[in-house]
Image: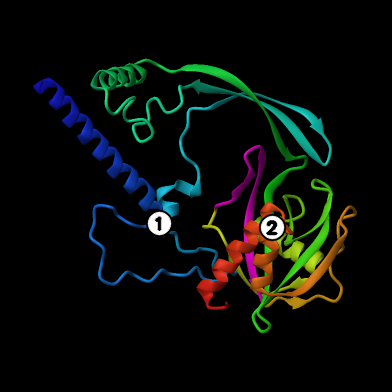
Amino acid sequence: PSETWIMVLAMNRRTLASCLSATAFFLAPIGIDAAAPSPSTPPSPSLPSPLSPSSQQTSVSSSAAFYPRGRDRPHDHEIVTEEVVYKGWRKVIRRSVSSPLRRPHLTDPLVNPLTNPNDDAADATTTAAVTTAHDRPPQRRVIHFDVIDQTHTTGGAVIVFAWNSTSKTATIVREYMPGPHRVLSGLAAGIVEDDKHSSVEGDGEPNSLVAARYELEEECHLAGGTWYRLTEEGVSVPMDKYVATEIVPYLVIDPHHVPDPRPLDDEEDIEIVTGVSAKELLRMIREGDFNLVGGWGALLALEKLRELGEI
């Protein structure tokens, strides 16, 4: 019947529109316009300049423009209560969150455009259900999460990859990690302590960069060099789904040795490992000799070194 063909055509148009929207969604973060023709000569990307007290700004990529500050998307989850249930070196927060109660994928045409592609009646039922779901306010529920945070006042954490441009090798650390109860490789890293790492008034350095310099000296006995922030300016990255701490990764090229470095923290037992090539780093990451954060920081640094022509 003609009504059936009209419904099928309408659904095909909706499905095509959904596919085009999905294409634009996935291409936008890498700077491609799905509706525009490809230029004959693509523009060359601009590289962020080294960090210095007088110049902290870096170029903003299309992904940062698409996702404000890298990840701050609007949502309808609301924190109801928070309670500290344990406090030591770290603290555990019981966070209660009011969240909408959804039927997964029901209203997502990209995931479930048709209940049964061969059943027009089922298709009409699905369309009606989607319309009804959009019209009525969503039901809500309260979910309880255990969230890990730092005990003292902090501005997050930093991780530093140190590179020697003459030997084309990195300086990393090897230390006992109580979580996995193993001695693993990693990068110089630490917490940004607001009372310890506040920048001197007028020097223009963010606290995260001050903390990164401190950690590099304490854990690798290195200082100076040319510094690069490996995220967009002002962006820090959450460590984990259930961890409040956010990390800023840095690359430093050609720091010099410090004969009398700042002391390590009492609980740290660190071995400095020098002369590690890019190939060796990748092997170590694949073999599980880095924890997740250390491997992530190393991969970002290696990509930046490729952009700079270092490797």
Bounds of the magenta span? 235-253
Q: Residue furthest front?
A: 118
Residue identifier under label 2: 294
Percent position of residue 112, x then y: 36, 30
- The N terminus lies in which quarter of the figure? top left
Callout 2–callout 1 Cβ contact below 8 Å: no
Label disc, if present, on residue 220 of the rendered structure: none
Near mark 2 (Cα within 10 A), the count class, few <14, some 14-19 or many ≥20, is: many
Percent position of residue 150, x then y: 74, 41
- The C terminus lies in which quarter of the figure? bottom right
Residue at 49%, 49% in the rendered image = 70
**Does residue 2 appear in this view?**
yes
Residue type of the residue flagged with mark 1: Ile
Residue identifier under label 1: 30
Residue 241 falls inside the magenta stretch: yes
How far apart, in angstroms, are the residues tagged by discs 2 and 1? 25 Å
Q: Earlier in the sequence, mark 2 or mark 1?
A: 1
Q: Nearer the viewer, residue 49 or 94?
A: 94
Is residue 285 depicted above or below 152 in this figure?
below
